[in-house]
């Protein structure tokens, strides 16, 4: 690996699985800033990240990673530039059961690219088990509208192995 440690950021809309992914990856209890959702619960989700999540992890080759999660709500979008400062890579987590997934994909890629041009990007789509209508090709089209190709994967944020694969895929895109 070309670095001693790396800061990675999980981005994406509310309920995508950012906080869950960080919990799955880390052996330590993450520092979280969960507060009750201002617009009321979304299904069984009653709280949301308002500032950031943070947890450290070690890859099996010993590389330390610092994992951060952004708040999903537009209301807290001013936190994005603060949390993205110094990040080498960003995982955009999108909920596969969202009807707006293509728009969310474009919005998040453009938002991140407007803050950092250099960070590596991958897209991880969760909850495909909950969505019969999920279409990978419409995500790929949304990605293409945003510029250079970005790898797209599906994963379950509750699963450590699948989430680790996503992190590895991101690290492979960095030089
Ligand atoms: N069925 C299903 N649930 C998932 C999957 N990935 C994550 N979840 C659930 O989706 C919710 C995501 O919440 P959270 O991590 O707080 O989302 P955040 O707002 O992006 O931080 C949690 O209840 C997870 O257990 C998946 O692939 N399938
Ligand atoms: Mg969260």
Image: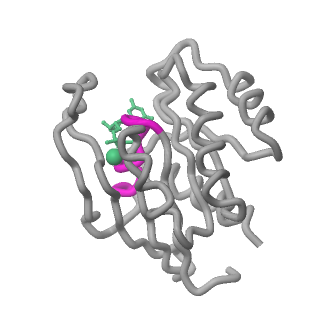
Left or right of residue 47, residue 64 in this image? right
Residue at the image position 21 percent from the left and 39 percent from the top? 47
Which residues are drawn in magenta?
Answer: 13-24
Most distant residue in the bottom direction: 4
Q: Position of residue 116 (x, y in %)?
A: 64, 60
Residue at the image position 56 percent from the left and 46 percent from the top? 92
Of 113 and 129, the residue lying toward us: 113
Specify whether residue 90 is painted magenta.
no
Residue at the image position 43 percent from the left and 47 percent from the top? 77
Quadrant where the image shows the C terminus: bottom right
Left or right of residue 74, residue 53 in this image? left
Residue at the image position 19 percent from the left and 25 percent from the top? 40
Residue 171 position by quadrant: bottom right
Specify whether residue 23 is painted magenta.
yes
Of 14 and 159, the residue lying toward us: 14
Note whether 161 is above or below 95 in the view shown: below
Quadrant where the image shows the N terminus: bottom right
Q: Position of residue 36 (x, y in %)?
A: 17, 39
């Amino acid at each position: 690996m070309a670095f001693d440690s790396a800061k990675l950021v999980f981005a994406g809309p509310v309920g995508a699985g950012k906080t869950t992914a960080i919990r799955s990856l880390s052996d330590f209890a993450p520092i979280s800033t969960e507060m009750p959702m201002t617009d009321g619960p979304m299904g069984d989700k009653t709280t949301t990240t308002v500032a950031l999540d943070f947890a450290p992890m070690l890859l099996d080759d010993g590389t330390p990673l610092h994992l951060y999660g952004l708040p999903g709500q537009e209301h807290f979008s001013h936190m994005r530039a603060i949390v993205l400062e110094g990040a080498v890579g960003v995982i955009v987590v999108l909920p596969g059961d969202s009807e707006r997934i293509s728009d969310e994909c474009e919005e998040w890629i453009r938002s991140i690219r407007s803050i950092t041009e250099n960070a590596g990007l991958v897209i991880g789509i969760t909850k495909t088990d909950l969505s019969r209508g999920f279409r990978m090709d419409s995500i790929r089209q949304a990605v293409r509208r945003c510029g250079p190709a970005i790898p797209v994967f599906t994963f379950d944020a509750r699963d450590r192995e699948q989430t680790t694969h996503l992190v590895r895929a991101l690290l492979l895109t960095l030089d």
